């Protein structure tokens, strides 16, 4: 416990961590202030007009579906055959749509919490992912580069215990901060929605979906924190983690993607870490493959999908491999 307490004090005292906390607060403040400045509480007349527009939009969807069914049954009036309809009328069936138009879709200049909370949460997750990676890399990288780890081993001469305590303390600190930041962040925008906007429909399904996104985001934050920690441990410096991340983005995410497009590789997005991150956060992402139907003679679906299960397996596997390598190298490396 003394080792963990000492590591917590060291983590909180680092100037880089304090700087990132200041940037986190500034980002929150800018986002909240711009949202507040661009929103207003809708008047009764605006709400009535929005409800009417939503009802009209739903009525038009019903009309389109009915005309599509009439076309299939051969009951369209003369001249209506020129209107385009999909081959399968279920594509325009309002009952099968993911969601129908609602009044809040037609409120202009109004912050609607129920509609924008998820996108705001993704912004928070992105910042916390960056925070976790940078803090994780600098936390161990600076100690390895300055000799702080050697001094710590003189007090507690057990390498695996020391490195494990550092990683555990780091993950606990990042998780605690992420939870506090999430509560403060969402509570702030909920208040804005109540006082200077419109809360929207906040039912149980909304909170479950938002909670699922938040949970997946926290897992991603912890994984990227471990990645930053592991890369800096392997490279013995913070810049090793930053350089590795930058090299991956430039060489593989940009260069590798371009090469695979040139050679017409099948399903190139499945080889990109960013695709798996997106699939994990959203549960499922779809990609367009222009080469999928090159030899097909009948109907061919050019869309392929990545789901969260294989995406999580890839992220966990990569993190486990790098973390294991970091501990093995740290166990035998000369630290002087």
Image (cartoon, helix red, strand yellow):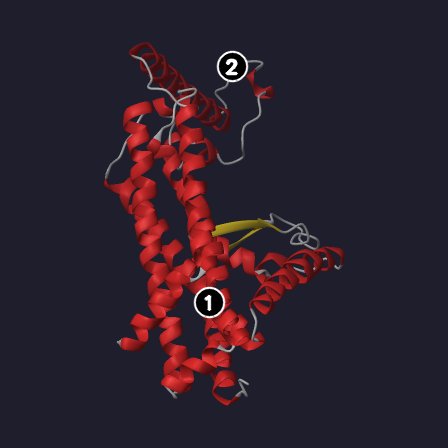
| Mark 1 secondary-structure assignment | helix
* Residue assigned mark 2: 77
| Residue beneath the point at 33% across and 23% down | 196
| Residue beneath the point at 39% across and 30% down | 94
**In this orientation, does residue 187 appear?**
yes
Residue 55 position within the rendered picture, expressed as x and y whole percent measured from the top left? 35, 18
Residue 53 position within the rendered picture, expressed as x and y whole percent measured from the top left? 39, 16
Q: Front-most of 86 and 112? A: 112
Looking at the image, residue 64 lies above or below residue 236: above
Q: Which mark is residue 139?
A: 1
- Side of 291 where 124 appears, left or right: left
| Residue beneath the point at 72% across and 55% down | 258
Residue 24 position within the rendered picture, expressed as x and y whole percent measured from the top left? 43, 47
Residue found at the very far left of the displayed protein = 204
**In this orientation, does residue 96 appear?**
no
Q: Front-most of 133 and 284? A: 133
Residue 100 position within the rendered picture, expressed as x and y whole percent measured from the top left? 37, 29
Give neighbour class at mark 2: few <14, some 14-19, many 20+ (Cα, 10 Å): few
| Residue beneath the point at 50% across and 79% down | 326
| Mark 2 secondary-structure assignment | loop
* Rendered image quadrant of residue 31: top left
* Rendered image quadrant of residue 121: top left
Q: Front-most of 320 and 333? A: 333
């Amino acid at each position: 416990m003394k080792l963990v307490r000492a590591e917590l004090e060291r983590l909180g005292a680092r100037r880089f961590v304090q700087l990132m906390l200041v940037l986190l607060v500034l980002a929150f403040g800018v986002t909240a202030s711009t949202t507040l400045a661009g929103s207003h509480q809708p008047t009764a007349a605006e709400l009535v007009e929005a409800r009417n527009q939503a009802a009209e939009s739903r009525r038009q969807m019903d009309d389109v579906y009915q005309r599509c069914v009439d076309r299939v049954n051969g009951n369209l009036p003369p001249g209506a055959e020129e209107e385009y309809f999909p081959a399968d009328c279920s594509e325009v069936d309002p009952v099968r749509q993911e969601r129908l138009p609602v009044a809040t879709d037609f409120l202009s200049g109004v912050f609607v919490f129920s509609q924008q909370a998820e996108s705001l949460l993704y912004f928070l997750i992105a910042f916390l992912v960056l925070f976790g990676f940078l803090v994780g890399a600098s936390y161990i990288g600076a100690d390895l580069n300055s000799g702080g780890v050697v001094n710590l081993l003189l007090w507690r001469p057990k390498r695996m215990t020391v490195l494990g305590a550092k990683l555990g303390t780091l993950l606990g600190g990042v998780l605690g901060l992420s939870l506090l930041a999430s509560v403060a962040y969402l509570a702030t925008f909920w208040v804005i929605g109540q006082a200077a906007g419109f809360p929207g429909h906040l039912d149980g399904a909304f909170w479950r979906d938002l909670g699922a996104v938040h949970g997946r985001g926290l897992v991603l934050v912890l994984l990227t924190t471990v990645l930053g920690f592991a890369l800096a441990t392997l490279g013995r410096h913070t810049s090793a983690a930053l350089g590795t991340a930058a090299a991956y983005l430039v060489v593989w995410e940009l260069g590798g993607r371009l090469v695979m497009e040139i050679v017409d590789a099948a399903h190139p997005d499945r080889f990109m870490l960013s695709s798996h991150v997106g699939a994990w956060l959203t549960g499922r992402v779809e990609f367009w493959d222009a080469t999928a139907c090159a030899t097909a003679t009948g109907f061919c679906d050019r869309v392929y999908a990545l789901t969260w299960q294989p995406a999580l397996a890839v992220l966990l596997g990569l993190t486990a491999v790098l973390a294991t390598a970091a501990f093995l190298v740290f166990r035998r490396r000369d630290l002087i």
